[in-house]
Amino acid sequence: MKTQKLIVFAGLMLAFFSLSGFKSHLKVNSTFSILEDQEGLIVYATFDGKEDYGYNFITKGKDDEEHTLTFQNVEDDVLKEFNLNSDDLIGTKFKITFNKDTEVTTDEDDMEIEEEINTITKLEKL
């Protein structure tokens, strides 16, 4: 009976140590790792112009309502191919590949501020 308990105990310890060696790929730190960066997202939208805060595109959601998507950054090679800084492309429909990152900063009251940063990595004119 003592040998049986020892074998069961050894088996449980082996399972514990083998499972505890796995790492989560979520970022665990003070910025809430639920806010995982996403790369290679795709959306189809119509260019609506550039503002001080970013590049606006209009798309229709599942609710059939129009929504404005704002991209704060555009990679240089994309801007060389498509001059989004001019009004010439307003009304043009694109397939947009982009990355979504969350930037967390602290204000003067030590409160965390989360800001979503969208970066266009590829544009295809439709």
Image (cartoon, rainbow, N blue to C red):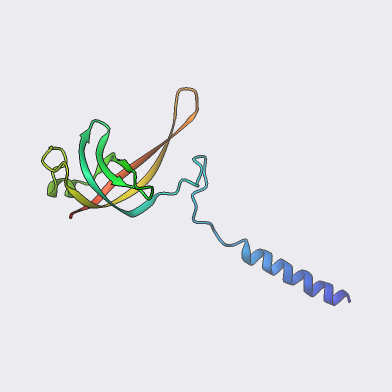
- How many marks overall? 0
- Viewer-proximal residue among 57 and 7: 57
Compared to 117, does 3 lie above or below?
A: below
Residue 114, x across and y down, in percent: 43, 36
Residue at image position (17%, 43%) is: 91
- In the picture as drawn, the residue positioned furthest to the top comes out as 108
- Viewer-proximal residue among 62 and 101: 62
- In the picture as drawn, the residue positioned furthest to the right comes out as 1
Q: Dividing the picture into quarters, in which one does residue 6 lie?
A: bottom right
Compared to 111, does 67 lie above or below?
A: below
Q: Is residue 88 left or right of residue 93?
A: left
Q: Dividing the picture into quarters, in which one does residue 15 lie?
A: bottom right
Residue 27, x across and y down, in percent: 49, 49
- Viewer-proximal residue among 120 and 7: 120
Compared to 110, does 117 lie above or below?
A: below
Q: Quadrant of the N terminus?
A: bottom right
Residue at image position (83%, 72%) is: 5
Residue at image position (44%, 49%) is: 36
Q: In this view, does 115 lie to the left or right of 98?
A: right
Q: Is residue 15 left or right of residue 27?
A: right
Q: In which quarter of the image is the C terminus?
A: bottom left
Residue 94, x across and y down, in percent: 21, 51
Q: Dividing the picture into quarters, in which one does residue 10 lie?
A: bottom right
Residue 53, x across and y down, in percent: 27, 32
